[in-house]
Image: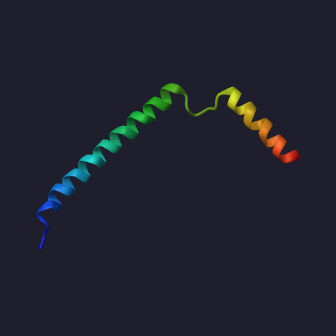
Amino acid sequence: MVDPGSSELRQRIDELDRELKALRGRLAALERLMGAGSEHPTDETTVRKKVVYDWQG
């Protein structure tokens, strides 16, 4: 027997899935606009210095 609330739950899950897909699309667009593919030069330098320090330690 099918639970009467299961269709409501299925609808809610589908709605949330659509929202998640939309948010992922928006996030990807923002990352492209901001150039999220590359690190900030200061971050790159800091990471490089830490790796050298850790390696020497």
Residue at 17% from the left image edge and 62% from the top image edge: 6
- Tell me which colouring the rendered structure shows: rainbow
In the depicted view, which residue is nearer to us: 32 or 49? 49
Residue at 36% from the left image edge and 38% from the top image edge: 23
Residue 51 lies in quadrant: top right
Please tell me how many numbered marks the rendered image carries: 0
In this rendering, position of residue 28 left or right of residue 12: right
Position in image of residue 3 (x %, y %): 14, 67
In this rendering, position of residue 24 left or right of residue 12: right
Position in image of residue 45 (x %, y %): 75, 31
Position in image of residue 50 (x %, y %): 78, 39
In this rendering, position of residue 14 left or right of residue 53: left
Position in image of residue 35 (x %, y %): 55, 28
Q: Residue furthest bottom?
A: 1
In this rendering, position of residue 23 left or right of residue 43: left
Could you tell me which quadrant the N terminus lies in?
Answer: bottom left
Residue 28 lies in quadrant: top left
Q: Residue furthest right?
A: 56
Residue at 40% from the left image edge and 40% from the top image edge: 24
In the depicted view, which residue is nearer to us: 19 or 56? 56
Residue at 28% from the left image edge and 45% from the top image edge: 18
